[in-house]
Amino acid sequence: MIFQSTIAKQVTFSGVGLHTGTEINVTLRPADANRGIIFHRSEGEKTVSIEACSNNVVDTRLATVLGKGDLRVSTVEHLMAALYAFGIDNLHIDIDGPEVPIMDGSADAFVQLLNEAGKTNLSHSRKYMAIRKPISVIDGEKRISIIPSRFFRITSDIAFDHPSIALQNRSVKLSPEIFTRDIARARTFGFLKEVEYLKANGLARGGSLDNAVVINDQGIMNPGGLRYADEFVRHKILDTVGDFSLAGYPILGHIRTYKSGHDINHKMVEKILTTPDCWQLVEFSDKDLKLAMQTEFPANAGNELAFEKA
């Protein structure tokens, strides 16, 4: 993917917020090059623009939350993961509530929206964050590291003291096709006792078996069971993609996680950004861009997503 990109046409969706339980409306609009991804959070007559970057992360306890001033947007990770996997660099996101709708608890609905919206290349090159030296963060049992790689790869291990999850491991080299097939449909999950606690404290009002995998002492409560045998670790990878998208650049590196969560993911992104001797920005030259512009079809030809090979 040599060029920066945005979506080809505007799309709108609505859904219930996981914690508020209220209906929230979202519109994705094309953006110019070098704008990045920006949430325009409205409440009444007030609108605040919140850039999707690590500096604007204000909470990671239950989800990744972006904020500026007194307005926030929670649960951004699933949408951000889909945008990152599909190579969308620039986008305006209009949202009239405090959280991105949970949809079915996965990123599948966002993949469908992006296919509907299509993709347009812009006449500016992408900058990649190439990891040059290993970096790691350890927080109790949780561990995360990133090492140099020619690609963006994630290897995740999880361990839960429950037979329905137990030990799971998966490694993926991210591409739009692999994300769509292997990761996007993996749903968020939680234990029934945790869900009941959240509801008792005024949270998870929109949570149900329609948008989360819920586990009790006997096993999986969802009538349809799991979408993948290892759906839990696949969802951890989904969250990791979304959280690392907030580094601000597509990454060339191999992320390895053990018992990861939004908190340690954010700590890792912050450590990367504050350790500049461990990475460098790389981009294609003017010669590469001119050659690509001569050989590729026009950026606005059609609305289907075109998956270019880097």
Image (cartoon, rainbow, N blue to C red):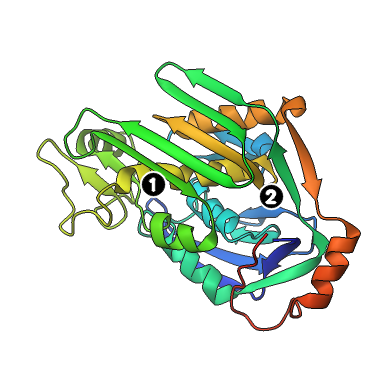
Q: Residue at point 31% right, 36% down?
A: 198
Q: Residue at point 21% right, 33% down?
A: 193
Where does residue 151 sit, x and y in percent of width and height? Answer: 61, 47
Per the image, label 2 sits on a secondary structure element best described as strand
For the C terminus, the quadrant is: bottom right
Give the CA distance from mark 2 to mark 1: 30 Å
Return the residue nearer the eye: 120 or 43.
120
Q: Residue at point 58% right, 32% down?
A: 146
Q: Which residue is mark 1?
A: 235
For the N terminus, the quadrant is: bottom right
Seen in the picture, residue 154 relative to 104 is either above or below; the reply is above
Return the residue nearer the eye: 294 or 303.
294
Seen in the picture, residue 297 relative to 108 is either above or below; the reply is below
| Res. 43 visible in picture | no
Where does residue 162 sit, x and y in percent of width and height? Answer: 19, 32
Seen in the picture, residue 77 relative to 123 is either above or below; the reply is above
Residue 48: give its label: 2
Where does residue 241 sit, x and y in percent of width and height? Answer: 52, 46
- Whether residue 196 sits left or right of residue 172 in the image: it is left
| Res. 212 visible in picture | yes
Which dot, 2 or 1, sits closer to the camera? Answer: 1
Where does residue 112 sit, x and y in percent of width and height? Answer: 47, 70
C-beta proximity under 8 Å, tags 2 and 1: no
Q: Amino acid at mark 1?
A: His
- Whether residue 262 sits left or right of residue 209 in the image: it is right
Crowding at mark 2 (Cα within 10 Å: few <14, some 14-19, many 20+): some
Quarter assignment of residue 5: bottom right
Per the image, label 1 sits on a secondary structure element best described as helix
Farthest-out residue, top: 140
